[in-house]
Image: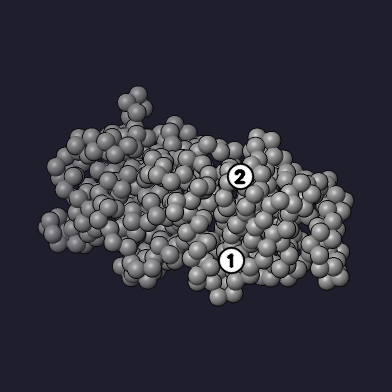
Amino acid sequence: MRSRVPCVGIRDRQNSNTGLILSLFVSGAERHINGGDLLALVAQGMESAMDRCIKEYAPLVWSIVRRYVQNPSSAEDVVQETFTDLWRSAKRYDPSIATHTTFVGLLARRRAIDHTRKESRRPHLEPMPESDSLNLASDGPTALMKCEREDVRQALAKLTDKTREIFTLHFEQGMTHPEIVEKTGLPLGTVKTRLRRGLIELRNQLRPADYPSSPQTPNP
Amino acid sequence: MNDPEIISRFEELDAGRILGDLDAGEMDEWEKLARDPRCQSDLSLELAAAALEAEFQDPDGVELPPGLLEELQKGTADFVVQKLSKEVEEKVVEMPLWQKVLSAKNTPWAMAAIFALLFVAQTFVSDPSTSTPGPTTIQVSPEEASKTLVAEGKDLIRTPFEGGGDYKGMSGEVVWSDERQEGYMFLTDLPVNDPESKQYQLWIVDPTRDEKPVDGGVFDIASAEGTTVIPIRNPLLIRDPKAFVITLEQPGGVVVSKQEVVVAVANS
């Protein structure tokens, strides 16, 4: 028998956005909740919203982390750390600057790259900033980006074929730089430069049209 | 190098930093340039990289390792409780004498009276605007979840609610598992409340948690018919609950109850 009073009527007292909370948990309404709203609820300390976030973003976080962390057990730890970061830093999320997916992806990348750096014990490496220092909201106009999926696709379409190819190898197929060298026959320096300048170009494409252009860096 | 060249070089190194492919020499160069006022790093490159990651991944096709979701949610519960515990410890009212009262008086209403006196004595700390989260909801229905608990819980405490004053006509039961840190209230004939005017609030009395009652959260009764199942999502670890007390409070609940309206008590 269906519950007469499913979950409606129970309120999180820390949260003033009661309507949003109720809509989150009323049966059948869950899938309509925007990811940004979900992060807003997490930012307000709502544990059940965090549960929902885990279900929503675990596949994305896992897939990003696994690109960098080969050991499955370590990867699980990094995923856990990413969600701990998410809980702590959700209040810093600003939907006008990045999509919720980009925000979560950023946290996952940071954790995964940090882990890789620690594992490799490479000297003189700059640690990634702690998530507590992450502040999308106040980094000024330079951080403003158009990061909707369609924006990213349009920006990718404006890149050269060579850049898109190397992005595919690196970001989609998860190849390391030496693997790309082996696959393409390009020198390591060219691979690095092409990735770096491609990222800069993509960033420039994602910036608003009226944003001052950065110095030109020709793509090899 | 002139200014644009310096800025361009820094930007390229910064992209390498974001991509994680700087060698030691490049990192030294990046650190040096990062101190140059002409070179300013922001989040834009990192956001672009994250957007690329998300674009090239296909989360829908990702198969998570078995048990990962459960582990993540368990981990979440741990750090949520840690955070809330710290907040609640700072806000929950002291009840210095209640343990003695509990051992001397077994009737719930005697205990509730002492409860009230102690709360009244400390009303100055009442601040609903900074109250801790109440029982958040679960994504399966409370009825289903409570059935699972009753079927699977090995250390169940089941104790009836006894209504007082205007609420004598109500009946109900609380089911609680220390092991699972999970519980439900089954409430019948409890009057419908207007959430804009008053809300019910649960308090959990646990002597093993020193002398502080635990806020069990705010809830509403939407229908006077049948039994309403209310999940308890305690923000603190409950080891040995001796009583569950329902009060009627202002909307949003209170940090410290004056116990002006004690609705029901379940004494375990």
Give the image location of residue A152, x and y in percent: 27, 38
- The answer to whether B221 is drawn above or below residue B69 in the figure is above
Outermost residue toward the top in this view? A210
Q: Which mark is residue A67?
A: none
Report the front residue among B31 and B144. Answer: B144
- The answer to whether B45 is drawn above or below residue B181 in the figure is above
- The answer to whether B128 is drawn above or below residue B227 in the figure is above
- Cβ–Cβ under 8 Å for marks 1 and 2: no
Q: Which mark is residue B181?
A: 1
Q: Quadrant of the N terminus of chain A?
A: bottom left
Discs 1 and 2 carry the same chain letter: yes
Give the image location of residue A18, x and y in percent: 56, 38
Q: Is residue B13 left or right of residue B70?
A: left
Image point 53% across, 51% down: which residue? B137
Residue A201, can we see it? no
* Element type at mark 2: loop
Report the front residue among B131 and A123. Answer: B131
Image point 44% across, 57% down: which residue? A82
Report the front residue among A96 and B73. Answer: B73
Residue type of the residue flagged with mark 2: Ala
Residue type of the residue flagged with mark 1: Gln
* Element type at mark 1: loop
Please state the total of marks drawn on the protein image: 2
Q: Residues within 10 Å of mark 1 (few under 14, many from 20)?
A: some
Give the image location of residue A68, x and y in percent: 32, 61
Q: Is residue A5 left or right of residue A34?
A: right
Q: Which mark is residue B224?
A: 2
